[in-house]
Structure formats: structure tokens, C-alpha cells
Image (cartoon, coloured by chain):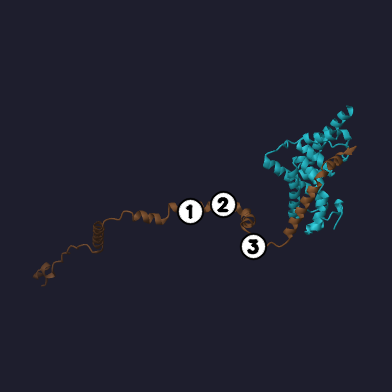
Chain colours: A cyan, B brown
Amino acid sequence: MLAVTEPAKLPVHEAKAGDPAAWDVLFRRYQLPLYVYVFELVRNEQASLDLVQEAFIAATRHIESLRDDSEFGSWLFGIAHQKCLQLWRSKRRVEVPLEELPDLPADTDDAPDDILIHHEAEEQVLALLERLPVDQRSALLLHSVEGFSLQEIAEITGVPVGTVKSRLHNAKRAMRRLLERHEDT
Amino acid sequence: MKTLKELLLERHRSAEPKLDVARGEFLAWLGGLRSPVRPERRGFEWVWRECLLPVRWHLAGMGAVWLVILLLNADTSPGQAAHVATANPPPPQQLLTALRQYHREILELTQPPPVAPIPLPPRRSQVLPSTAIA
């Protein structure tokens, strides 16, 4: 069985040929990050499990449309993102703010792991993440969990790069303020 | 100190057994997908999904066109006109009288009109008395 996990070495080419072992490797590699992303958006365990599975089923059907094998991860997260939007539309739970935020300069520190969280602040950070607007939460999750670039997040969520910068900037600012307040107390 | 990624992955680590089940179901589905589909399993649902659903709007449009054609055809169909014509047939005597009158008019038109007799010129012997030849 193939057992590689680096994006560049993932068996995407074999998956295109319909190799079940390759799909097994891809599923194992992305199942938890994808579940984290979907769950933190829809906040429902069963729906999240279903969406992860549906995202992979859709991926098997449309894998031929993926031109660059190295972009499999962002492509898969894009499918999952669309599935989340469909779920919201079907449940009329559209809490995504539709207005576009003005473009802001990107943060000087774009590294995904730039926010360090004390053990005491963990619950508060998770609570804050839940309260963030969905578009900011989505950008922050994609940036933090999988380390996607601004360009990749823009492609996944279907918005301009400037909008992604704004969303990420606002999410990180909210997160830092919370952590600063926690440190002060 | 943890990063947000570490915090989230740790929080949802308990979902991994369920994700493994989902992966198993996915691979089973994938295995079934790779096997050839037997014709007897292609029921109405398959026909509906694969053949009819993609062209549902075309079928609906053609159906609407046919409906309009049928409605227009029903208003001006010759069958309905024949039905109206045979609804009140004239009595036989009236029909016979009309036929006789029609026959008489035809005869009048085809026979030549009576010509008045043209008066003959007087005979030569009557115009020139015996003195004409001396």
C-alpha cells in the first residue's frame, strides 16, 4: 500500500487511474483536516462526516478536471467548501455576510502558525472561533489547518485575493485581541 | 503553547474512528463503482437519472409545443366542420326542388336563345320591271 503524505508525493496520478489504494491514501491524508474545516463551519458532527464522504465521492467523479496534481488539496477543500454552501442554502441558514470587505494590506506575518495559544486560553479561542463570521472563520481555518496560501484560499472560497486578505486580517486581529486580554488578566 | 492547528486537530481527534468508517464506506462504494454494472440493476431510477433528467427541460419544452399544436388543431379541424355540416340536413323535397331549379337554369344557359327570322330580300324580278331589259 502507498503510504506517503507529502502533497508532492501524494498518489493523485494513480487516483486518476481509479486505483482504490491511492484513494485510500488520499482519504487518510485529508480526512481529519477536512473534517475539522467542515465541522467548524457547519457545527454538526453527522453532517460533517457526510460532507467529508460526499466531497471524496465528488472528487472521484471530477478528478479528470484537476490539471495540476499538486493542487489536489486545495481542489478537495474547494469541493468541501461548495458542499457546505449547498448545505446552508438547503437549510436556509445563510449567515455568510455577502458584502465584500474593502481590501486591506496583508499581514506582515502570514505564517499559519503565528498565533500561539496558552492552555488556559484554549476554550476561549475555540469559543471565539465559533463566533467569528463564517467568511473570516473559513479563511482562518484554511490558513491555519492546512497552511493554504492566500491565492489558494481565494480559489477555494471563490473570492478575490484582496477579500481573503481582509477576512484573514480581521480574524487574526480578533484572535490577538482576545489573547492579549487573556494575558492582561 | 499550541498553534490553532494543533488545538483544532487535537479537539477533533475523537472523530477519527468515525472517519475511518466513512473511509471504509467510501472505498466499498468505489469498489462497487469499478465493477461492471449489470443491466438488470438499471431500473427506472437509472433511466430517469441518466437519460431523462439531463434533458428534462427539452422534453418539457417539446411537450408544451405539442400541446399548443394540439389545441390549435382542435379549433380548426375539418372533422368538426363536417360535424357542423351534417348536424341539420335539409329535407328531401327541398333538396329535390333545388336540384330541379339548378337543372333548369343550366338548360337555359346552354340552349341558344330564339332567333328572329331575317326578312329575305325582294326577288330580282320583283324589283326590276320588264322595262329593264330592252
Disc 2 is placed on an element classified as: helix
Q: Mark 1 touching mark 2, by CB under 8 A? A: no
Determine the residue positioned at 65% across, 63% down. B39
Instruction: Report the amino acid beneath label 3.
Output: Glu
Where in the figure is residue A73, as x and y percent of width and height?
81, 49
Sort mark 1 into few (<14), some (14-19) or many (20+) by Cα contacts within 10 Å. few
User: Which image quadrant for residue B89?
Assistant: bottom left
Q: Are marks 2 and 3 on the same chain?
A: yes
Q: Are marks 1 and 2 on the same chain?
A: yes
Labelled disc at residue B42: none
Q: Which of disc 3 and disc 1 is earlier in sequence?
A: 3
Q: Which residue is mark 1?
A: B70
Labelled disc at residue B40: 3
Instruction: Report the amino acid beneath label 2.
Output: Gly
Q: Which residue is mark 2?
A: B61
Number of numbered labels in the structure image? 3
Residue, far top = A185
